[in-house]
Amino acid sequence: MKILSFGEILWDIYPDKKYIGGAPLNFAAHLAKHGEDVYMLSSLGKDHLGKEALAKLKKWNINTDYVKICDKKDTGKCLVTLDENAVPSYDLIQDAAYDYIDCDNIDKEFDVLYFGTLALRNKYNMDSLSKLLKDKSFNDIFVDINIRTPFYSCESVVFCLKNATILKISLEELPIIADLLSLDNTIEYNEFVRILKGKYSNLKTIIVTLGADGAYCYECKRDDEYRCESEKIKIASTVGAGDSFSAAFLYQYFKKTDIQLCLKYAAKIAGYVVSQYDAVPDYNVNDFL
């Protein structure tokens, strides 16, 4: 499987430490751990954070051919501050390098395209990605809505819904999406996915992550439902858990594995990730297969 992951590469900057992240990068890193051929489509600043990011991507065996180095913009950052109770607040710096991703030089064919809403917070990337979707075809388009307030809009969410073949949303995001679509925001998730199916014929598979209650998957064509429990494990950090779930699910899904097994495997990987502090911890895929 050959995957093109479009979107943000950024650093979470704490007062005393920093971690590389961004949902598209985490997703790419976990698929690379599974031995898949993964390319990042992004932009970094010509600064020390950009150099460190490139080194991380190469360490994780993520192809950087389509990572642009932007002279006039800084590498993406999210400033994290903690209050007296260690509760974090986040400041996603705007006008970063990843807000200017160019898609004109994509000279290879890919099985899957991945993207979310954060990198679509400005017109530049929306136009760039629209052109890519017009010029290239993909067997599947995996969209993780991944709403980060206030960096989403009705336009960006609808763009995601109109282009996805595999859609992942969280239970917390469901009422936000419902409001944007002028739908009842109290509707149950198993009813909501059927409404989305009726509105967007491109959708083949819809995943709803349910936090501690596991995950739900709806196969649109067959009208089939699947559920799995979450792994019972001591949580160290939830950062990157959803991205690891997406990557693990797609890894099995593309092999045409039974959906129930796709969910179960994704839950195993995500369960391990939440037991670690790193969004992309070291692990051996064979231990989970």
Image (cartoon, rainbow, N blue to C red):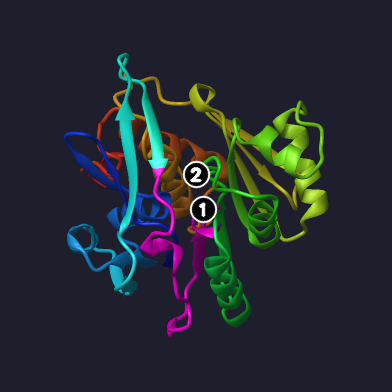
Q: Residue at x 69, y 33 (%)?
A: 175
Q: Of helix, strand and loop, which one carries label 2?
A: helix
- Where does residue 205 sit, x and y in percent of width and height? 64, 50
Q: State the quadrant of the N terminus.
A: bottom left
Q: Is residue 43 left or right of residue 252?
A: left
Regarding residue 39, the answer to whether it shows in the image is no
Residue at 64 percent across and 46 percent down: it is 206
From the viewer's perspective, is residue 134 above or below residue 153? Answer: below
Q: Nearer the viewer, residue 28 or 221?
A: 28
Circle 1 sits on which residue?
253
Amino acid type of disc 1?
A: Tyr
Q: Residue furthest top?
A: 85
Instruction: Look at mark 2 in the image and give the residue it sits on.
Output: 262
- Report helix, strand or loop for mark 1: helix
Marks 2 and 1: in contact by CB < 8 Å? yes
Looking at the image, can residue 82 be seen? yes
Q: Which residues are magenta?
A: 92-120
Q: Which quadrant is home to the C terminus?
A: top left
Mark 1 or mark 2, earlier in chain = 1
Residue drawn at 32 percent across, 72 percent down: 70
Q: For the point 32% across and 35% down, which residue is it?
A: 80
Q: Position of residue 230 (x, y in %)?
A: 46, 26
Q: Is 77 drawn above or below residue 60 in the view shown?
A: above
In the picture provided, is 97 more to the left or to the right than 218? left
**Residue type, label 2:** Cys
Q: Is residue 220 magenta?
A: no
Q: CA distance from mark 1 to mark 2?
A: 6 Å
Q: Check residue 119 in the rendering and tell me which mark sits there, or answer none.
A: none
Q: Residues within 10 Å of mark 1 (few under 14, many from 20)?
A: some
